[in-house]
Structure formats: structure tokens, C-alpha cells
Image: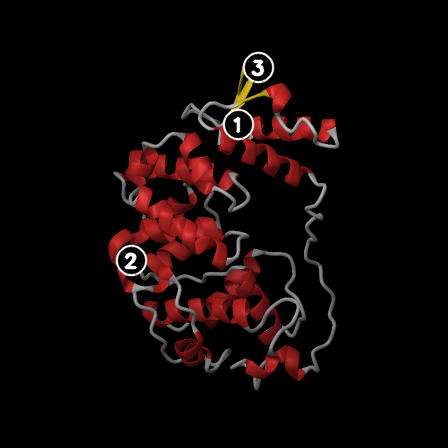
Amino acid sequence: MSLMPTPAPSGMPRLPEWYRGAARDLPWRRAKFHNDYGAWGTLVSEFMLQQTPVIRVIPHLQAWLARWPTPREMAAAAPADVVQQWANLGYPRRALWLHRAAVEITERHDGVVPRDVDALLALSGIGDYTARAVAVFAYGDRHPVVDTNTRRVLARAILGLAHPAPPSRRDLALMESLLPASAAESAVFNAAAMELGATVCTARAPRCEACPLLGSCAWVGAGRPDTGDTRRRQATYEGSDRQARGAVLRMLREAAPAGVLLDAVLPEWPDRRQRDRAIDSLISDGLAEADGEMLSLPRRGDQAY
């Protein structure tokens, strides 16, 4: 659908007009993308964008949809192929959830991504944000779409806080109260709020002088106070179990489809127990499969996602 700006509600003036001139040219915002892939393309892009920068997603998204342009085609793929195609996007369980969602869409909805938010929420790996993003940006329905960037904009512009509180249903209610009445206008408003948070109202260095909400922002009006930050801090990657998991998974991708002898998995890793935890957790998550003395990407389609 086209996301052309329209007048904003009184709570956040000038936001859609700003979006018209400032929005990044991203694949999933183009009419051709929606014509080629429909709601499936939107769903895949939203899975990939979870906790992953846009610049890393774009080349993977294009390759993914070229290989599996519909849910039915992806549902027929082996889990190992899905994990390998995910490459270095991070949080690889998302690949298995997306594969499982494709199977569910094929079996429950005849290969068509559902439009109803509750039906979307019933699919594997889909939460409040992704379900509403698909309903709004693929189907043009009216719902509040709230991601991390939107929550930060709401916290500052409306609530006067330096950083948002932990996610809650209150975020959806607040965004709902700000949406224009029409579905088309609300889709633009949702997209504009996310774009503002991603490019101007950033977490560490907000560019308030470039913000279209500068004159009405509650946080700026209060003198940009330090109101605290209750966001969860992610553990350092270097030396973490996440790093060990990534190293094991990278080795399995490079060895696919044959797999690797268990004793040959990261033989020089400095913490043997951490290496073993990484292997065990990958098997538990369905991202790896042990068969005798061999470890490989998952070959079967019946993993517990």
C-alpha cells in the first residue's frame, strides 16, 4: 500500500508532512515490493527487522524472497536450508519461527497470510508489533503499530520522559489515542512515528533541532530532563554464550549439509563448558541436530519451535 502523508492529529503535529520529505527509501515501502510479494513480503521483512539494523536486513530480504516468494514455497523447505539462508542476521531462532509460520499459513490459511490480528498472533514467532504491522502496512487496516522507536517518540513527545518505560499495553492505548480516524491516514502516522524514532529521536543522541515535533515535545519543553532509564541492558557480546552459539552455528553452516564431528566443534574455544552449553542450547532450540558423533543443521521438519 502507498504511505503518502496526510494531516496529523493534534498530539503530534506536522509528523506526516515531515515523513513525506524525510522517509528513507526502503524496499518494503515501495509499491512494486507489495505487488510482487504482498503481505508475505511484509511479514518476512518484519521478522528480519526484529533487533537487526535495516542496512543488514535489505540484502538478506531480497535474497530470501527471491528463493521463497510465497509461504507455501518456504513451508516446503528443509529447516537446515532456512537456518543457512538466515546467515548472519542474528537471533537465528527467528528463522525457525518464520519457517514454522509459513507452514501454519499454508496449512491453516491456504497459503495466504491472514489479515486478522488475532489470526496473525496465533502464528509462530508473531507478537503484538508484527501482527499489527502486517495488518496495517500490508492490508491497510487501522491499528496502532508500536515498536521500540515509536515508544521512544511517545515517551518524549507526549509523556516528557527521556526514555520509555518497559513495554506494556499502555503503549498501544496511547498510540491508538493519537491515530487519525481513517485507516489510510493512520498507516502513514504509524510509519512516520517509527521513522522519526529511528532517524531523529534516537536513544543516545536525539537530533532535537531537526525534529518536526520540536515545538510541541513535552520532554524538550521541560528542558530535556534526565528522568532515568529502566531499559534492560544487553550483556556484552564478546565472550558471551551468544558469541559461542554464533560460532558453533557458523561452523555448521560452513559444513552443511554434512555436519561436524562433535569433538571437532570449536576445539580451541577457551571455555569448554561454554562451548558445550552453546551446543546443547542450539539442539534444544531446534537450530542444530545431534546424530551419534555428528552435529549438523536440523534436517527434519518436526523440530519443537
Expressed as whole percent of the image width and height from the top left, the position of residue 203 reads 63, 66
Q: Residue at coordinates 25% horizontally, 38% vertically from top-left?
A: 110
Residue type of the residue flagged with mark 3 = Glu
Where does label 2 land, which residue? 34
| Number of on-image labels | 3
Report how far apart the C-alphas of labels 2 and 3 lie in the structure.
Answer: 46 Å
In the rendered image, which quarter contains the N terminus?
Answer: bottom left
Report how far apart the C-alphas of labels 2 and 1 lie in the structure.
Answer: 34 Å
Q: Secondary structure at mark 2?
A: helix
How packed is label 3: few (under 14 Cα within 10 Å), some, or many (20 or more)? Answer: few
How packed is label 1: few (under 14 Cα within 10 Å), some, or many (20 or more)? Answer: many
Query: Which of label 2 and label 3 is nearer to you?
Result: 3
Report how far apart the C-alphas of labels 1 and 3 lie in the structure.
Answer: 13 Å
Expressed as whole percent of the image width and height from the top left, the position of residue 210 reads 55, 81
Q: Identify the mark nearer the N-term, 2 or 1.
A: 2
Q: Identify the mark nearer the N-term, 2 or 3.
A: 2
Quadrant assignment, res 159: bottom right
Residue type of the residue flagged with mark 1 = Ala
Expressed as whole percent of the image width and height from the top left, the position of residue 222 reads 69, 82
Q: Residue at coordinates 31% horizontally, 41% vertically from top-left?
A: 71
Vertically, is 157 above or below 260? below
Q: Secondary structure at mark 1?
A: loop
Q: Residue at coordinates 33% horizontally, 39% vertically from top-left?
A: 105
Where does label 3 land, which residue? 293
Where does label 1 land, which residue? 288
Vertically, is 84 above or below 144? above
Expressed as whole percent of the image width and height from the top left, the position of residue 15 reads 46, 78
Q: Secondary structure at mark 3?
A: loop
Q: Are marks 1 and 3 in contact (CB under 8 Å)?
A: no
Question: Can see residue 113?
Answer: no
Q: Are marks 2 and 1 in contact (CB under 8 Å)?
A: no
